[in-house]
């Protein structure tokens, strides 16, 4: 009887002990893994669309830009060397320079006012405006850096009555860069015009890191709001003091006038006044 009574009493005690250990263990685990409440974001922190890098590296001398880029991008071998390769040569056309608004008067006016030693062109396509600026700056010995992934955009060869159908695919490569290089060689400007074959965002970020600034920056890549907005914000820190940023397609209807909306919003945030110039837009010289 005594043994049975002890056994009967011990079961509730064992159960209570188990429950106590379980509750303590669960509580420790719960409170150790519960994350503290995130602090509320301030109003300026919620404006993620405006958070772009503005503190670029110190400017390197213009004379050092081309050698540095040849080293970092092309392993010190110019992209014009031994061009064209045999498998591409039959597909290339001589002087196939096509663009839109590439010889507008705004180019000559801005070259005259800025006297640029370095020009950054954000979006170059086949190099029409770049080669026009090269012609305008021949006496200045200006270096022109052309940022483009050289992929065009979906369906571009079907536009404008198929004016770009000659750009064939070679293993999925639309050979825009190869035709660009051919155009530069035809113009004899391979010493001053350099393609930078990456997305505009990654190329501008690299320029910011490397200290590559320009006296004149043209933004003429994506025509939707978000692309134009990102390009404008990333290009602005690379405009040297006294330099000018401008672009094309200010009146283009694409994406509900996406370029114009991006330009106007940027100007409003920076307290700048946009100067329309035909199809182009121009911002005041950077102070």
Image (cartoon, rainbow, N blue to C red):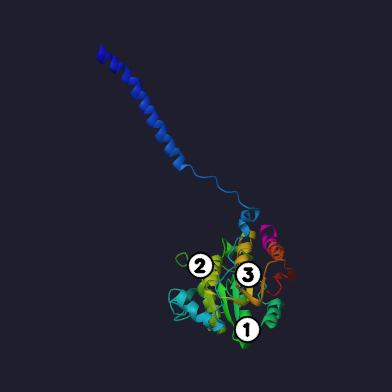
Nearest the eye: 103 or 30: 30
Q: Is residue 261 magenta?
A: yes
Q: Position of residue 66 (x, y in %)?
A: 52, 80
Predominant SS of the magenta segment: helix
Q: Of the residues tagged 2 and 1, which is closer to the observer?
A: 1
Query: Which region shows up in magenta?
Result: 252-262
Residue to which mark 2 is pinned: 174
Q: Is residue 207 left or right of residue 223?
A: left
* The image quarter in which residue 140 lies: bottom right
Q: The C terminus is located in which quarter?
A: bottom right
Nearer to us in this view, 60 or 84: 60
- Determine whether the residue tagged by mark 3 lies in a helix, strand or loop: helix
| First along the sequence among labels 2 and 1 | 1
Height in image: 192 above or below 21?
below
Sort mark 2 into few (<14), some (14-19) or many (20+) by Cα contacts within 10 Å. Answer: some
Work out which residue is located at the far top of the displayed protein and give it: 1
Mark 1 and mark 2 in contact (Cβ < 8 Å)?
Answer: no
Q: Percent x, y for residue 58?
A: 56, 75
- Tell me the mark number nearer the camera, choosing from 3 and 2: 3
Residue sitting at x 31%, y 16%? 8
Mark 3–mark 1 Cα distance, whole angstroms, equals 25 Å
What label sits on residue 135 in the rendered view? 1
Q: Which residue is mark 3?
A: 236
């Amino acid at each position: 009887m005594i043994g049975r009574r002890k056994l009967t009493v011990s079961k509730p005690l064992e159960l209570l002990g188990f429950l106590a250990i379980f509750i303590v263990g669960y509580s420790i685990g719960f409170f150790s893994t519960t994350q503290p409440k995130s602090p509320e974001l301030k109003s300026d922190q919620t404006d993620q669309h405006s958070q772009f890098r503005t503190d670029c590296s110190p400017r390197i001398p213009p004379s050092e830009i081309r050698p540095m880029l040849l080293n970092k991008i092309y392993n010190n071998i110019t992209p014009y060397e031994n061009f064209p390769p045999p498998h591409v040569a039959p597909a290339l056309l001589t002087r196939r320079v096509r663009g839109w608004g590439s010889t507008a008067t705004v180019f000559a006016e801005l070259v005259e006012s800025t006297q640029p030693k370095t020009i950054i062109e954000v979006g170059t396509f086949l190099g029409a405006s770049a080669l026009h600026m090269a012609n305008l700056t021949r006496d200045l010995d200006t270096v022109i850096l052309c940022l483009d992934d050289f992929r065009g955009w979906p369906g571009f060869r079907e536009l404008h009555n198929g004016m770009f159908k000659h750009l064939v695919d070679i293993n999925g490569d639309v050979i825009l860069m190869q035709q660009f290089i051919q155009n530069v060689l035809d113009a004899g400007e391979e010493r001053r015009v350099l393609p930078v074959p990456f997305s505009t965002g990654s190329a501008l970020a690299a320029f910011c890191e490397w200290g590559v600034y320009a006296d004149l920056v043209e933004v003429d890549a994506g025509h939707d709001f978000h692309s134009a907005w990102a390009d404008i914000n990333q290009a602005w820190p690379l405009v040297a003091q006294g330099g000018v940023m401008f672009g094309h397609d200010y009146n283009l209807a694409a994406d509900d006038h996406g370029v114009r909306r991006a330009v106007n919003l940027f100007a409003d945030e920076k307290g700048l006044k946009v100067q329309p110039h035909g199809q182009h837009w121009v911002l005041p010289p950077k102070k």
